[in-house]
Amino acid sequence: MQAIYAFGLLILIAFLAARFITKRTSLSPVNYFFYSGFIYILLGLSLGSSGWNVLSSSILTGLTPLVGLGLGWVGFLFGFQLETKYLKRFPGKYISLSLLQFVFVFLSSGFVFFLVLKLFYPTEQVYLLYGMAAALGLLLSLNSPTLLSMASRVIPERGNYFYLARFLASVSGFWGIVGLVLLLSFWHFPFFESFVFLKGGGFLLLSTLFPILLGFLFHFLTKKKTSEEQMLVYLLGLVFFVSGAAFYFNLPPLYLSMVLGITFSNLTKIHERLYPLLLSTEKPLYIIFLILIGALWDVDLDYTVVFLVVLMVVLRVLAYILPLPLFKVILDFPLHLPTRFGLCFLSSGGIGVAFAVSMKLAYPLPLTDIFLTIALFGVLITEFISPWGLKFSVFQLDSKEK
């Protein structure tokens, strides 16, 4: 009964907050912190066991499946935007730049994190440190277009740098989520167990084929004169079914729902009418998701965690600004890529939070508790400073272009 009361409280907060969360238009760190919804992680933290204990551990046990549903909804919305017609509007070199950027950020930051983790946690098994370093590297590779969406309300005339940044931020999550499922597939079983690649391959195949088959089946069942409102209800049910199944079998809901979103978006003919309806339902669900994450977050700070959070922020800045001139040469990129352009990729947004929580749900270990704390603190800090980075990069570069 307490879980029902708590869920009712979450719905009330989400309803009231959704009325005001999108009203802020001034691009400042405080306004963006509210607009992006990250303030609700802190609200959840205050309501959880680390604060007033309104959402106690016993209540959260009953509400934890809602986190899986939230992960699925985030993944589906992300995948639904990756329509082939949308991607074809951009030059092929944009995709190449996105992939090159992902590989560099992942490998460079993952390597640095592994060296530091091995120094700080010498008694941990090496394969766990490899996995945590890879997870932190993947997390840094994720960008969010939310900040650029808010900025689009402020910039009356957007230039080439703005559209390039928007595209890179929109696509980068794909590489990171694919990296997540690969990590969970082949890190799911310790390396000293037998048939690691066979088990991991089966895990990966099931995670990919299941949502694809459901996407085709759903399209076949709904392609005859189904209204947008009915389709929205059906889609919600489908995403919740996929997310619930993934959560139950310890598959990553974020990845399965992303594949479902990509599959269905490229099958349906009413994509452009459905997408605004899907976005209109996003805010209340997203707010509940963030509050629950904050309530589930068990904060345990020490000097090693603080150092790793600072390292995460520093690596995020350096890994995005340093290689850009080299990428320009390698790809013979049509636009000049000055180092300051990398400062528009400080925000990892909800996709970064969803990634961090996915890792924690897959592996409830002490090391992943540390990972979640590092990830959430790092994301919160970079979200707060990202508007300054955007103003210093895209705003000034586009004004010079004109």
Image (cartoon, rainbow, N blue to C red):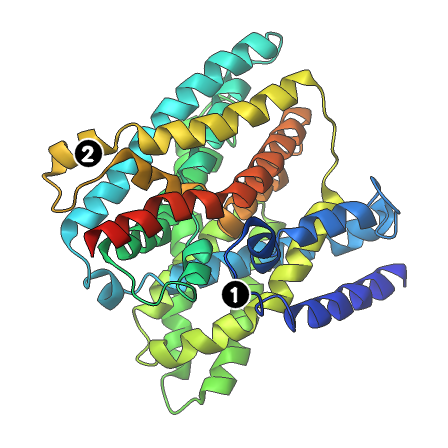
Placement of 19 over or under 389, stated as above or below: below
Q: Residue 232 at x, y = what percent?
A: 50, 79
Res. 138 image quadrant: top left
- Between 139 and 236, the one lying in front of the other is 139
Q: Residue 214 at x, y = what percent?
A: 43, 66
The residues bearing labels 1 and 2 have C-alpha atoms spaced at a distance of 34 Å
Placement of 71 over or under 140, stated as above or below: below
Q: Specify whether residue 177 is in view.
A: no
Q: Earlier in the sequence, mark 1 or mark 2?
A: 1
**What numbered label is drawn on residue 25?**
1
Instruction: Name the mark nearer the viewer: 1 or 2.
Output: 1
Q: What residue is drawn where x is 81% and y is 65%?
A: 9
Q: Are marks 1 and 2 in contact (CB under 8 Å)?
A: no
- Between 357 and 315, the one lying in front of the other is 315
Instruction: Estimate how packed mark 2 is, as few (under 14), some (14 to 19) or many (20 or more) residues with alpha carbons within 10 Å.
Output: some
Q: What residue is drawn where x is 28% and y is 34%?
A: 339
Q: Residue 347 at x, y = what percent?
A: 47, 45
Helix, strand or loop status at disc 1: loop
What is the number of callouts on the image? Answer: 2
The residue singled out by tag 2 in the image is 327
